[in-house]
Amino acid sequence: MTVLLPHLHDAQDKTALRFGDRALTYAELAAVAGDLARRLRPTSGEPRTARVAVWATPGPETAVATVAALLAGVPVVPVNPGSGTHELDHIVADSAPGLLLAEPGADLPSALRHLPRIDVALPPTGTAPPAPATPPEDEPDPQAPAFVIYTSGTTGPPKGVVIPRRAIASSLDALADAWGWTDGDVLVHGLPLFHVHGLILGILGPLRRGGTVHHLGRFTTDAVARELAGPATMLFGVPTMYHRIATELDHDPALVDALRRARLLVSGSAPLPVYDHRRIAAATGRRVVERYGMTETLMNTSVRPDGTHRPGTVGIPLRDVSLRLVDEAGSPLDVHDGETVGEVEVRGPNLFTGYLNRPDATAEAFHDGWFRTGDMATRDADGHLRLVGRKSTDLIKSGGYRIGAGEIENALLEHPNVAEVAVTGEPDPDLGERIVAWVVPDGARPGEEELADHVTHTLSAHKRPRVVRYLDALPRNDMGKILKKALHE
C-alpha cells in the first residue's frame, strides 16, 4: 500500500518547512503532527471524525494540521480565511466537520465558533526537539478521502470536491517524473494554503519528495529574489505574480540573477500571457513552465523542462493521465492542428471521487467515464495543449466561428498600451455574439479601432473586438483569476 508521506520519518534533521523565521525539521514535524494525529484518532469504541476543518492561514500551523489529519486518516476541509459569511455557512453545513484546527489566538468568524477547536501549538524556536514519533500503524486505503476542497461556486453554492489519497500520490509522482523533482529541491512560494496549488502541490509536494518548502508568507519580488539567491531551486507562482516579476526585471538586476539560478519556474492556476513568458525569458534566459489542472482532477498536463517549449501551451498529458478533446455533441476530435477548439475531457488516477452530497452533480460531470472539465483547448501536432478559455465564459460563437477568448487576450497584451485585458462575448443580433475587450490601459489609452486592427493583423479579422470597454483594474479572485462574470454584472 502506498504511503502518502514516506519521508516523514526518515529525514530527521533536514528542514521540512520554513515560514519566515519559523522552521520545522522532519523530526519536529513528525513529532508534532504525530502527536496531533493521535488526538484526532478515535479511542476504542468512539466513532471516527468524518471530517476536520482547517483554518488555512499562510503559516506552519496549517501545514502541521494538514499533515496530522492525513496521518490520522481524517479528511481535511481547508477553510479560506477570506470567505464571506454565506459561503462559510454553506461550507460548514455541507461538510459537517466534527472539529476545527487553527493557529493559537486565531479570531474565528461566527460560522466556525460552535465547532470543537484544537489549537495547533508548535514548539518554540530554539527549544529541544520533541520526542521522536513512530509512523502510524496503518496507512489508510488509497481510495480513502484526503480532502474536501470547495470550488468557487460561480454557478451556485460551492461544491465540495472529494479528493482521494491515490489522486494526491498519483499527481505528485507524475509531476516528479515530468520535472525531475527530487529530495534535493527547495521550493519557494507565497500562495494561499486553502486550495490545490498552494497546499497540495506547494506543501505536500516537497514533503512527499523528502525535500523542503520555504513559504514567503506574502509574495513580493524582493522575497523571491532573496530566496532564489539562497538554497531555493524551484518557484511556484500564478500569472499575477509572474507579471509583477516581469515588470521588475528591467530595473532589478538582483531579481534577474536570482531567477537565473532557479532550476524550475512554474506557473499555474490560470494561463500565463505569452508576453510575460517572453519578457522573463529575454531577461533571464529561463523559461516558465506551465501546467494545467483543477480541483477535480489535480494535475492533467505539464510542459516538460527538458522538452519542447511553446509559450502559451500547458504541455502534454502527465504520466497515467488520459486526455481528449470533444466537440459540442461530445464526439472525440482526433485533430492536432492547433486550431480546432474542443472541450477537454480527462480520466485517470488523478480524478476526484465525486462532489460531497451531490450525486446529481457528480453524474453530470462525467461523460462515458471521462470527466468534463469545461475547459476549451486546441492541440498541436506534438500533442501540446493550448487552453483558450472556459466553455461557460470564454467560448465565443461569433459569425459562425467558435473563438477562444484566450488567444485574443494574448494578442491584445502584446499592444504596448495594454496593461491587462479580459475578453468576453455578449449577445449580438447579427453575429450571435460580439467580442468585447475589457482593457486596463498602460499609459495612453489605445483607441477602439487601433486595438481591432492590432488583433486583425495578429490573428484574423473575425477575432477582432467589436466593443472595447476601459477599466482601472480587472476583478480577480484570491488566485489572480479574472472574474469575467463580474465584468458584466
Image (spheres, rainbow, N blue to C red):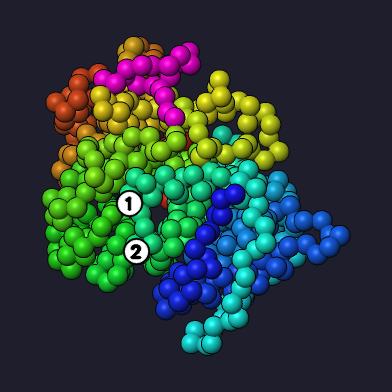
Q: Is residue 257 left or right of residue 121?
A: left
Residue 346, above or below 471? above
Q: Position of residue 105 (x, y in %)?
A: 62, 75
The answer to which image quadrant residue 114 occupies is bottom right
Q: Kindly identify the amino acid type of the residue bearing the numbered disc 1.
A: Gly
Residue at which label 2 appears: 184
The answer to which image quadrant residue 249 occupies is bottom left
Q: Position of residue 347 (x, y in %)?
A: 50, 30
Dot 1, crowdedness within 10 Å: few (<14), some or many (≥20)?
Answer: some
Residue at the spot x=66%, y=66% of the render? 37
Q: Position of residue 52 (x, y in %)?
A: 68, 57
Identify the mark at residue 190; answer none if there is no mark. Answer: none
Magenta span has 325?
yes
Residue 474 seen in render: no
Identify the mark at residue 180; answer none if there is no mark. Answer: 1
Q: Position of residue 67 (x, y in %)?
A: 57, 62
Residue at the spot x=45%, y=56% of the render? 205
The answer to which image quadrant residue 299 occupies is top left
Q: Is residue 403 left or right of residue 460?
A: right
Alpha-carbon distance for marks 2 and 1? 10 Å
Q: Which sits in the foreground, 166 or 134?
A: 134
Q: Is residue 7 left or right of residue 455?
A: right
Q: Kindly identify the amino acid type of the residue bearing the numbered disc 2.
A: Gly
Which type of secondary structure does the marked residue at label 2 adopt?
Answer: loop
Dot 2, crowdedness within 10 Å: few (<14), some or many (≥20)?
Answer: some
Q: Which sits in the foreground, 352 or 83?
A: 352
Residue 298, above or below 27? above
Numbered range of the magenta stretch: 322-342
The secondary structure that most of the magenta stretch takes on is loop
